[in-house]
Amino acid sequence: MIRERIKTETAKHHEAVEAVGYSGQIMSGKLTLEEYKKLIITNLALNKAFEAQWNNLPFDVPNSLLLDQRRKTEALEKDATILGVSIPEKNSTSFPTSSYATFLGTLYVFEGSTLGGAIIYKHLKQNTNLKHIKDFYFYTCYGESLGSLWKVFLEHLTQLEDEEQIDSAISAAKATFDQTKDAFSTINENAL
């Protein structure tokens, strides 16, 4: 039940992120190097902030969720180094993680982004503006485990059956999409 609801009820929020997150430029092969740098630095700031919260969650995360394998900060830092952009210090962004349900709602956005990253990677590799870049660590961070990690995540998400928990997860996903949109909007307004 939650899979259909979370996708449907967050669709407009997801589209708003894509509108400011260079989706059109990526798919058309027209993403510039400067835009790619902004993609990496924004994703780095967001992932670093979210992953920092994992150390102080007020609940236990099941080991079967494989949370440590889902960390993306290191891959993003490698991309930032290749691009010669400075790695942001600790960020004050805080995502909804007050309960396991809200945490899964927030993780839905980050994991969905990683799943979409496989499609983005193919377009980045073909983009002549980025031909000098040999490695795209963030967009290939799960490698062969991409499908299995998504499946494991969905198994945990679909265990939320209580209406209140489902509502909390969806609300957290919407808030996370909105925070992501705001982060991209802010960096788009500023030069690196």
Image: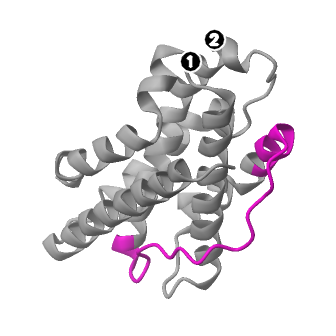
For mark 2, give the secondary structure: helix
* 139 to the left or right of 24: right
In terms of secondary structure, what is the magenta stretch mainly? Answer: loop
The disc at residue 160 is: none
Q: Indicate the amino acid at tag 1.
A: His
Residue 157 vs residue 122, the one in the foreground: 122
Rendered image coloring scheme: one colour
Answer above or below: position of 72 versus 15: below
Q: Residue beneath label 2, please? A: 126
Picture residue at 29% right of the left edge, 67% below the top: 169
- The answer to whether the residue labelled 2 contacts the one labelled 1, judged by CB atoms less than 8 Å apart, is yes
Is residue 81 highlighted in magenta?
yes
Q: Residue beneath label 1, please? A: 123
Magenta residues, as a range? 77-102
Q: Indicate the amino acid at tag 2.
A: Gln
Q: Percent position (x, y) of residue 106?
A: 41, 63
